[in-house]
Image (spheres, grey):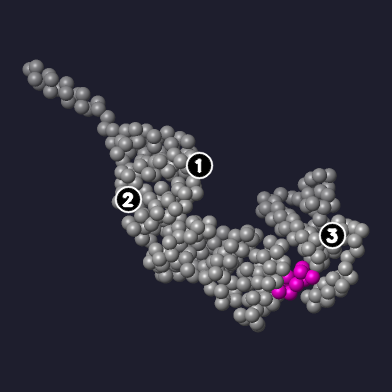
Amino acid sequence: RSKMAETGEAATDSSEVVDPKAAALEAKAKGNELFAKEDYDQALVFYNKAIELDPSEHVYFANRSATLMELKKYPEALADATKCVELGPSWAKGYLRKANAELALRKNAEAEATCRAGLALEPTNLGMRLGLQTLRDRGYETDMPSDKAMVDLTLASDEKAKGNELFTKKNFADAAKHFTAAMAYNPFDHVFYSNRSACHAEMAKFEEALSDAERCIALSPEWAKGYNRHSLALYELGRYPEAEAAALKGLKLEPDNEGLKGLLQKAKLETCESPEVQKFMYEQRKEQRNKDRMMKMLGNSGLDFSKVKMFGGGLGGLGGGFGGMSNGMNDAQMRQMARAMAQAKAMPKMPDAADDEACEEIEADTA
């Protein structure tokens, strides 16, 4: 009887014991739910609980690492990702988590090594290939023989096609992502850099457009279109003499290229001016772009601007425009203002009549 009682008591006790692995899975599921809702602080609480209940499961460390990345706690994210790889060395996703943290911490060499270790397990993993491309975009030189060995022409072509389709639909941001993915599968194709440069230019990200154009030319210096991208980016950055030089280089390769001819003429219209006028023209164009972007953003909001009063006048005040510029100022009006500003700054020195005549001739050609 005593033994039966003992057996019954033991059975009762075992039914009350909580299985830590099952409880950890429940905590992980709750963490995943909160992570999907972007409630990262609360997700962290549940991933902490999961790890406390079952510290041998590598996935929990991976999930907590991803959460810490979202919270911008990069050293902690790296520590968790490192533990994940230690516990699950054959799981490629752990290497992705580790590489992402290393990239955030600018540990470039470590990030490359981690990406390559993960790609040895899963060669087509786009996340780790993008990690390597991020390094290249930073100017970090990844190992060329390894890069050549992992080229996938088919997947690169697929990504390029998706980018081209989005570009024609004027979805430049997503198009750029696909061209970046194409680079991740084949970082040696100059066309991908040219296409992404065009995306950046359309989004007025001219520094990025310039960087891609330079990479395009480095990969294929005899391709005229690369100089088109290069000249355009330089022009939009106010580097007019360099824009002119880039257009001339392209025209040496392809003398009948209409795009390059147009860029050359535009650049010449600026380089015949004094450096001060060139500077003022760039500043005014940049200001005009910012104003146009603001107007577009506000226009998309559905607001009625005619009833909006700012600074005691129309939108932006100060003469009805941003920084005192009139709305809809064209290039000729900007130039007139730039010359006046440069002349005022240079007073009492008078402008060079020969320079004025040269610019008037170019303006006549472009009219």
User: Around disc 2, counting alpha carbons within 10 Å, would you say few (fewer than 14), some (14 to 19), or many (20 or more)?
Assistant: some
Disc number placed over residue 342 in the picture, else none: 3
Return the disc, 1 or 3, that comes first in the chain's sequence. 1
361 displayed left or right of 137: right
Is residue 62 depicted above or below 109 in this figure?
Answer: above
Residue 72: numbered disc: 1
Does the stretch in magenta take in 271? Answer: yes
Contact check, label 1 and label 3, Cβ < 8 Å = no
The answer to whether 177 appears left or right of 346 in the picture is: left
Q: Give the residue at x 88% y 65%.
A: 351
Tell me which amino acid carries mark 2: Trp
**Residue annotated with mark 2:** 91
> Quick check: 332 left or right of 177?
right
> In the picture, residue 125 is in which quadrant?
bottom left
Toward the bottom, the furthest residue is 256
Q: Which residues are magenta?
A: 264-272
